[in-house]
Amino acid sequence: MTTSPASAPAGTTTSGRPRVVIIGSGFGGLFTAKALKRAPVDVTVIGKTSHHLFQPLLYQVATGILSEGEIAPATREVLRGQENARVVLGEVTDIDLANRTVTSTILGRSTVHPYDELVVAAGAGQSYFGNDRFAEFAPGMKSVDDALELRGRIFGAFELAELATDPAEIDRLLTFVVVGAGPTGVEMAGQIAELAHRTLRRDFRTIDPTQARVILLDAAPAVLPSFGEKLGDRARRQLNKIGVEVQLGAMVTDVDADGIEVKDADGQARRIQAATKIWAAGVQASPLGKQLAEQSGAEIDRAGRVAVQPDLTLPGHPEVHVVGDMMSLDRLPGVAQVAIQGGRYAAEAIKRRLAGKAPKGPFRYFDKGSMATISRYSAVAEIGKLKFEGFIAWVLWLVVHLMYIVGFRSRLTAVLHWVVSFLGPNRSQRVATQQQVYGRLALEQLGPHFSISKSGGPKDEVQATEDLTRRRSA
């Protein structure tokens, strides 16, 4: 594949219809695009990846329950039946509110996308609270790459322990530390414990996988604090029951290849020797939020989220809608339902605005509840004033998550893999390679120009005044 530095106003449409540009192919971006299916507009969806990621199930990819394809269908496949939608691969590097353009870049090629209406749903990444060096040794859980790397690290730790002869080294390899006692951390810790005690119990001859330590750390004083004290305590008891050591009031101060440094609430510092560390604490909104704030005068919070108007638009820019994890409004949680409802609301606002109709009214979020699995047949759920735990909550969790997996085929294969993993001791997705484990670090050391040079590199300067694809699109 060859690339060239292009400065093309992509999406110059000959249809004369309004151009809607959507940044992000997550829940907010995808549901906005789908809600505009019958609208008289040309839609361009710009995504950093070629897939739509169902992020709440990433931990199941990391622990061998599901394959990445079941939770990350191709965005083009999802939208291929939508004639007014076009999908573009690239990372948005610049938003110009004055000129109403968005610039995306992929392998050295920059493309300019004019817009009449803009929806920014670029999501959020992992936050290390100013300690970005931790990422080298403690991957987050925000992408398919993260999940595959963690799968390699988790299963690889058991393989290396089988070869080790030093008891201290075996202990280090069989110690897994998950940082963050929110839903992601709880679910991850629970599944690693199940791996050790059920799936891998009889697979090794030298080591005993059931002796693995799974530690869940958090500086907060409670597990699942957003679920309330009752469900949080239930989750903690269940985690302890399946072998997870819950250590609260423990703030991480340093991370390296061999372990993690912790400072307890009483000020005492200690070290945990652990080969595998997983970061599930904190999120940081896309840096595009800062660009929007600087150009519109909107405020941003500590997590980089943009303070939007009640109708999810920017101050002075009714044509710019911010949805999902990038927006800050009424302390709404960073969950999929906020993004889905926000995307649908933005789509309706665009249709009304272009039709000359009055705005529908301020965005109102309908809370459909919160859920988290702890282990096989055990979960906690909060739906309105109702609280569920144990098997009933686990069934509710299965049904709700199955509904939001995109595509019938993905739902079917997900159910089959759940049957294999939950009714029996096996996991169907246990393939792990060195490339998965070390690819990210190697690419970071090689630098951003490596991928461009290995893909043909930018060669010819291209100047264009029209859509280079000659297709009618936004």
Image (cartoon, grey):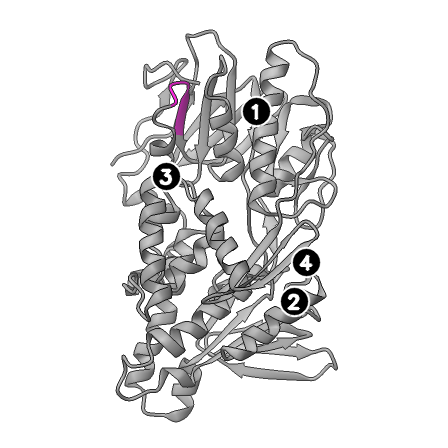
**Label 2 crowding class (10 Å Cα cut-off): few <14, some 14-19, many 20+?**
some
**Label 4 crowding class (10 Å Cα cut-off): few <14, some 14-19, many 20+?**
some
Q: Earlier in the sequence, mark 1 or mark 3?
A: 1
Amino acid at the residue labelled 4? Ser
Q: Earlier in the sequence, mark 2 or mark 4?
A: 4
For label 2, the SS is helix
Q: Earlier in the sequence, mark 4 or mark 3?
A: 4
Q: CA distance from mark 2 to mark 3?
A: 33 Å
Q: Nearest the camera: 208 or 106? A: 208
Amino acid at the residue labelled 2? Gly
Amino acid at the residue labelled 1? Ala
Q: Nearest the camera: 153 or 288? A: 153
Residue 337 falls in which quadrant of the image? Answer: top right
Residue 164 sits above or below residue 183 on the image: below
* Residue on which disc 1 sits: 347
For label 1, the SS is helix
Marks 2/3 in contact by CB < 8 Å: the verdict is no
Amino acid at the residue labelled 3? Gly
Q: CA distance from mark 1 to mark 3?
A: 22 Å
* Residue on which disc 2 sits: 232
Q: Which residues are drawn in magenta?
A: 82-87
Badge nearest the viewer, 2 or 1? 2
Q: Position of residue 220 (x, y in %)?
A: 69, 68
Which numbered dot is residue 172?
none
* Residue on which disc 4 sits: 226
* Residue on which disc 3 sits: 407
